Amino acid sequence: MALPLVIATWRFPQKTLNHLATHAQVVCWESDCPVTREWLLEHVPEAEGLCCLLTDQIDEDVLQLGKQLRVISTMSVGYDHIDIPTCTARHILVGYTPGILTETTADLAFTLLMAAARRIVEGADYVRQGHWKEWKPNLLLGQDIFGTTLGIVGFGRIGQAVAQRAQGFGMKVLAVRSPRQDHEDMEAGGVVEIHNHESSNTPPVTFVDLPTVLMQSDFVSLHVPLTSDTHHLMGMSEFDVMKPSSILINTSRGAVVDPSALYQALQQGIIGAAALDVTDPEPLPVSHPLLTLPNCLVIPHLGSASTATRSLMADMAVENVIAGLRGERLPNCVNPEVYQ
Ligand code: DGY
């Protein structure tokens, strides 16, 4: 019997690909650049499985053509690039890769926090550009991390892992679980003091609403998924209530922050600095105004980018697609309601 066709918008590591090839005929986009729309639309009509990346828009047009699709597997924890309601309506299972990238992404969020606080990139540039001629008492002064307050917006797996790291730095942790919801549920400015332990190794956290996190934190780290509720969650009215010294860290999705408002807030000193792993648009063009600001550190969406984690993500993505083709439960499924 012919094996089902799986198309993949990137080339999996050979070992992972060999495993997938025992269950499916596999056609991969072979280039290192993102898949072209033409390639995707040309190949999806025959495919029963689709392995994609967070850069691929799996929208109505793709799903319309993909009449044979039974399973879509993204190698990411975020799935805002996939039209989930349409997949569910068409009984297409969607797999994703939660959990395995939590610690790696939390490491990166904390790396950005520290790099921005202590002006590490500016310091490295200063040396490379030959400006380091003597030691000066007021050269590139940054901000302390130990003993300050960290505000975590979105207290899921990654937010909790960032809170654990903050504990080692003696930080007070404020968190907002689900920004819009908490905002509605609490009186403006109200604080609900819940010294909560989400799991046995989660440090004490005080849950407050978004305005309180913004007003009281020295660092604000974003960990919400991108949805219609969180799109441009951080705009001018949010920056306006933050401390002028505060540092924003974003490792979630670029569009959670309004980039024009962020530019103004950084340029006018409304907030102190920003460190961004994700941007809107992404990639950020080199001519973008944010890149003219010394207090804005931007890196190219490296949250889960360790060799070990990316390899685990590839394996998990392949396990999801294989399970879908075999009519089994996906180990990690976005829309389990399809089974009902
Ligand atoms: C994800 O998996 O959604 C991350 O953004 C990748 O780093």
Image: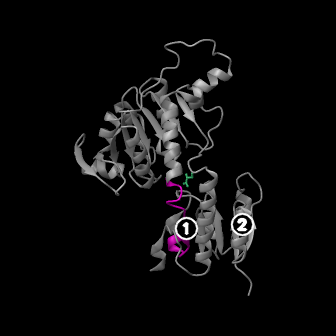
Q: Which residue: 73% across, 70% down?
A: 18
Q: Disc 2 on helix, strand or loop?
A: helix
- Label number found at residue 137: none
The quadrant holding residue 45 is bottom right
**Amino acid under disc 2:** Lys
| Residue visible at 36% across and 37% down in the picture | 170
Q: Nearer the viewer, residue 94 or 287?
A: 94
Q: Is mark 2 within 8 Å of ligand 1?
A: no
x then y, percent, for residue 32: 75, 52
Give the residue pinned by disc 2. 15
Tell whether label 1 touches label 2 (CB within 8 Å).
no
Q: What amino acid is labelled 1 in the image? A: Gly
Q: Residue at x 38, y 44 (%)?
A: 152
Q: How many numbered discs sit on the rendered protein?
A: 2
Residue 46 lies, in percent from the top left, at: 71, 74
In the image, the segment drawn in magenta is: 87-102
Residue at mark 1: 95
Residue 208 rendering spot, x and y as whole percentages: 28, 45
Percent x, y of residue 96: 54, 64
Nearer the N terminus, badge 2 or badge 1?
Answer: 2
